[in-house]
Amino acid sequence: MAGSVYASGKYALGVCDRCGFTHKLLELKAEFTKQVPNGLRVCDQCMDEDHPQLMQGVRPVHDPQALRNARPDTNADEGRTITGTVVYPPINGAEYGAGE
């Protein structure tokens, strides 16, 4: 007796645990929450894939933020100076440079 103890079920019908519609039993898939089966058998339309954002803390994350031997910018004051001419907004609808 080399075979499975269960019938093949190619003609069997099953009910989706989410929407309640009848589908072929072989088309219903197990649903997972955080990579653990939650016991629901659902159709393709009702299937909710595990979102990667729900896996926070499952995998280690190494994301260093600090720099070793960081050097500050010594020319910061020179980069902050404003050069050029100052332009004032128009007053009472006058055009730029109308008073000159």
Image: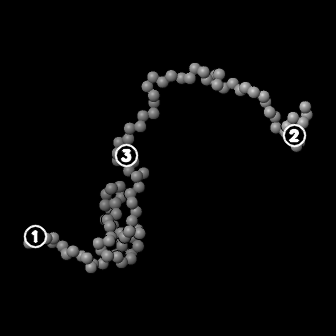
Indicate the position of residue 65 as horizontal and vertical percent values: 45, 33
Residue contact between numbered discs 3 and 1, judged by CB atoms under 8 Å = no
Estimate the spatial distance between the alpha carbons at disc 2 and disc 3, rounded to whole Å: 61 Å
- Between the C-alphas of marks 1 and 2, the distance is 96 Å
Q: Nearer the viewer, residue 22 or 99?
A: 99
Q: Residues within 10 Å of mark 1 (few under 14, many from 20)?
A: few
Secondary structure category for the residue under label 2: loop
- Residue 50: give its label: none
Q: Is residue 81 left or right of residue 52?
A: right
Amino acid type indicated by mark 3: Gly
Q: Please tell me in which quadrant of the rendered image residue 49 appears.
A: bottom left
Amino acid, disc 2 = Glu
Q: In this view, does 62 lie above or below 68?
A: below
Colour logic: one colour
In the visual, does 71 lie left or right of 46?
Answer: right
Q: What element carries label 1?
A: loop
* Quadrant where the image shows the N terminus: bottom left
Residue denoted by label 3: 57
Of circles 2 and 3, the one toward us is 2
Give residue 20's quadrant in the image: bottom left
Instruction: Write down the residue under mark 1.
Output: 2
